[in-house]
Amino acid sequence: MNLLFWSWGILLVGGLAALFPGLPRQFARWLGCCSAVAGCIFGLGATIDSLGHGPATYMYPWTVPGGAVSLSIDGLAAFFLVPIFLIGLLGAIYGFGYLADSSSRTPGKIWFFYNLLILSMTLVVTAANGMLFLVAWEVMSLSSFFLVIDDHKQSEVRRAGLLYLLATHLGGACLFAFFLGAGTLCGSLEFSVFSRLATLPPIAASTLFCLMLLGFGSKAGLFPLHVWLPEAHPAAPSHVSALMSGAMVKVGIYGMLRMLSFFSVTPAWWGWLMIVAGLGGALFGIGMAATQSDLKRSLGYSTVENIGIIFFALGFWLIARAEGHTLAASLALTGGLLHIWNHALFKSLLFFGAGSILHGSGSRNLNRMGGLLGRMPVTGLTLVAGAMAVGALPPMNGLVGEWFIYRALIESGGEAQGMAGFYPLVLMGLLALVGGMVILVFTRLIGIALLGQPHHHSATTAHESGWPMLAPMMVLTGLCLVAGVLPTLLMGPVAAAGAILGHPLLLPRKEWISAMWLGLGGGGIILMIGMVVIVTKIFSRKGSVGSASTWGCGFQVPTFRMSYSAEGYVELAQKGLFCSCLRPQISGGRAISLFPGPAELFHRSTDLVLTRLYHPVFARSADLCSRLRRVQAGIVHLYLFYIFLATILLLGWVAHFQG
Amino acid sequence: MENFANILLLLVILLNFFILGSARLGACIRSVALQGAMLSLVPVLLHHGSPHSLILGGAALLLKGFFMPWLLFRAIRQVQIRREIEPMIGYVPTLLLGTLATAGAFIFSDQLPLIEAHKGSLAIPCGLATLAAGFLMLITRRKALTQALGYLIFENGIYIFGVLLSEALPLMVEAGVLLDLLAAIFVIGIVMNQINREFASLNVQNLSSLRE
C-alpha cells in the first residue's frame, strides 16, 4: 500500500510542479514525463506486491458525509491497475516524443492532467467507499476532458470535448443515483456492506443494475452510449487516446464488474441485456470503423467494437451462471477478462502507431497516406502486429480472449437442451461476423495507409518518429506477442480477479494449454507461410519478372489516383453486408458519357445514433428548456418574489404537515 | 405591561399598512423610524426592564429611531427625490396583498407548535406580517431607497422574533444583527449613489441590463 501512496504522491507533486508558471519549457516536459514514469513504476510495484502478498486495505476517516478514505487492492483491482500503470508508463515516454515539437505555451498543463488522470483512475480502481469512488470518478472524467480539449483552438476539438463532457456527466448522474440508492438500501457507502445488495427484492436490484449499466456503460463506450468515444479519441493527443482507450474505458468495465461482484445471484435477463448491447455495439462499431477515413476515428469505433465483445462475454457469463453452466460461465468470464488486458495492450499500440503516422505524415486521413511502410518501417511493422492482434490472428494476443469466448458458447450450446442450445450458436455466428469485419477493417487500414503508393504528396515526405515514440510501441508489440504465445502466464491474475467476482475459476488447466498451443501452432503456420514466401522470392529472383508500381493495372503512366481509396475498399462490403442505416451518405461521382467531364464524389459517414437519436432528443429538450430562461429575467424584484414565494410555500408546508 | 406591548405590536402592523400605501418617501422613512423606535420598547416591556433588554432596546432605539433615518434623509437630499413613482404593483393591490399576508400570518401562527409561554402571543403573527410587508416592499418598489426601507421593515420583523428569544439569545448575536443592518444600509446608500450616477435615476430595474 505504501508503494501506491508513493506513486500517487510522485504523480501529484510532479504534475503540479510541471504546472508551475515561468518554468522553462524543456524542464517542464522532463519534469512531467519523469514524474509520470516514476509514479507508474511505483504503482506497478505496488500492484505486483499485492498480487504476491494478497489483498491490502487502508482506512482513514474523512469528514464528507458517508465518505471515508478506504482503499483496498484485491485481485480485481490489481487486474485493472496493471494495464493502467503500464499504459500510463509507456504513454508518458511516448508523449515525451510526441509533444516534443508542440508549440503549446504551457507544456506542463497536459502533463499535469495526464498525471491526474492516471492518479484518479487508480484511485477509482482501489476505492472501497462509494463517496471516494464518485469523487475519484469525477476527477477522472474532468482530467480526461481537459486532455481531450488540449488543442482547443480547433472548433472540432471543442465540439468533441463538449460531447464528451455531456456524456460523461450524464453517466455520472446515473452513478450518483446508483450509489445513493445502494447506500440507502445498504445503510452505508462502504463497499464492505454492499454485499447486502444480494438480498434486495428483484425490482430494486434491477433498477440498480440499469443505473449502473447506464453509468458505467457510458464511460466504457457501450452501445448506444458510445457516441462520445469516436469523437473524443481523434481530438485528443495520441498518447492520451491510447490511455483513454486502453485504460480509462476499462475503468468503466471495472466499475461494472465491481458492482456485479456484490450481487451473488443475478437474473439471466441482465446478461441478455448486456449481450444485446454488446453485440449491437460490436456490429455497429466495426461497421462504422470500416467506413471512416479518419485513422483515429476508425480506431475509436474499433474500441466500441471491442468493448462490445467484452460486454458480450460478461453478459454471457451472467447467463451461464444463472443457468448453472459452471464451465461455460468460467470460460466466458476468463475470455472477457483476458480480452480486457489484450485490448488494453493492442489498442494502445494501435493508437501509438496512429499517432506516429500523424506525427510523420501530418494527417489522420487515410487517403493522404499510402506507402508508409517503406518510410516508417518500425511504425509500420508494429502497426501490422497490432492489426494482427486486433484481428485475432495468431500468434498475437487478440486470439486468446476470443478463443475462450467461443469455447464458452460451444460449451453452453452443448450443455443446453433442445432449442436453448440454438441461441449460443446464433451468437457464435454473429461474433464470427464481427471477427470477419475486423479483418476487413484492418486490412483496409494496413493496405491503404502502409502499402501501395503514396496517395498524397504529404505521404512522400513522411519521416519515422524518434525513439521515445518507437520504444513504447516495440515494448507493446513484444507484450502482445508474449500474451498471445504464453497465455498461461495470465492464469494467476485472471484467477485472482475471478475469485473476487464470486466465481473461483475452476477452469481446467488444459483449456489454458490449448489456448497456448493455438497461439504457438497458429504462429508457426503463419511463420511457415512467411518463410515459403521469402524462399520462393529468393529463388524466383533468378528468373526475370518485370516490376511495376503497385495498383499500376498495366497502365503506361499509372498515378496514385487509380489505386483504391479508403472508401472504395469497403464498397463491396458496404453494399452487400451493411444494413442501410450504416451506409455512408454518398453523392455524385458518376461519369456517364464517353468523354466525361470532371466529377466529384462526396462521401460522409456519420454516426446514426448521434444524428438520429441524440441530436433530435437534445435539440427538443433544449427547446423546451429555453422557455425556462424567462424565469431568469434579470429583475431583482422578480428574484425577491421567488424567494418570497418559496418562503410562503415552505411555511404552508410546515403548517400543513406539522400543525 | 403585556397589554401595552400588544398595543405597540398592533401599531407596528398599522404602520406596515401605512408604509405599503404611501408614495411619499419622507413619510415612509419617518414611519419606518417610528416602527423601529416602538419595537425597541417592546423587549423592555416584555421582560420588565431587565438589564439585558435595556441595553438591547437602547441600542435599537439609537440605531433605528435616529441614526438610520438620518442617513436615509441625507441620502434623499443628495439624490433629490421625494416620491416613489410607478411602483411595479400599484398601491392598492399592494395593500390588499399586505392584508392577505397579515391574515395568513395570524392563521399560520395558530398552527405552529409553540411552547406554552408563547401561545396566544401577538409577537409571532406580528413578526410574520412585518416580514411579509418588508418582502412586499422589496418586490413592488423600484427605487433603491424604498428597497432599503423594505429591508429595514424586514429586519424589524426578524427583530420581533428576536424579542421572544431575547432572554435566550446572547447579546453578541443581537448586536451582530444590528451591526449587519447598519452595514447593509451603508452599502445600499453607496449603491444608490452609484446607480444614480450611472443611470441618472434611482431605478433598480436598470440593473437588469447587467444580467448575462
Image (spheres, grey):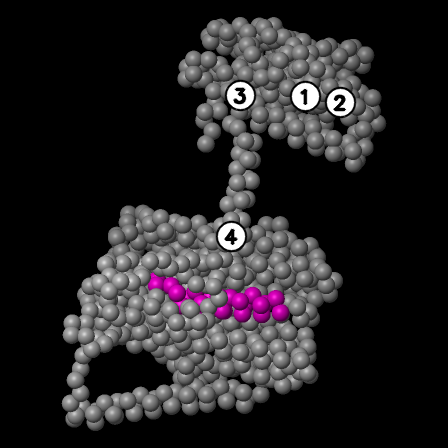
What residue is shown at x 46% (from left), y 76% (from top)? A435
Q: What secondary structure is the magenta-colored segment mainly?
A: helix
Q: Mark 2 or mark 3: which comes first in sequence?
A: 2
Tell me the amino acid under the disc marked 2: Gly
Residue under disc 2 on the same chain as residue under disc 3: yes
Q: On what subunit does the disc labeled 3 rest?
A: B
Residue where numbered disc 4 is placed = A614
* Closer to viewer: mark 4 or mark 1: 4
Image x and y of residue A30, in percent? 29, 60
Q: Secondary structure at mark 1?
A: helix
Residue where numbered disc 2 is placed = B104
What residue is shown at x 20% (from left), y 69% (from top)? A559
Circles 4, 2 touching at the beta carbon (< 8 Å): no
**The image quarter in which residue B27 lies:** top right
Q: Nearer the viewer, residue A82 or B58?
A: A82
Residue under disc 4 on the same chain as residue under disc 1: no
Distance from Cα at disc 4 to Cα at disc 3: 52 Å
Q: Nearer the viewer, residue A300 or B117?
A: A300
- Quick one: which residue is furthest to the front in this view? A594
Residue where numbered disc 1 is placed = B132
Tell me the amino acid under the disc marked 1: Ala
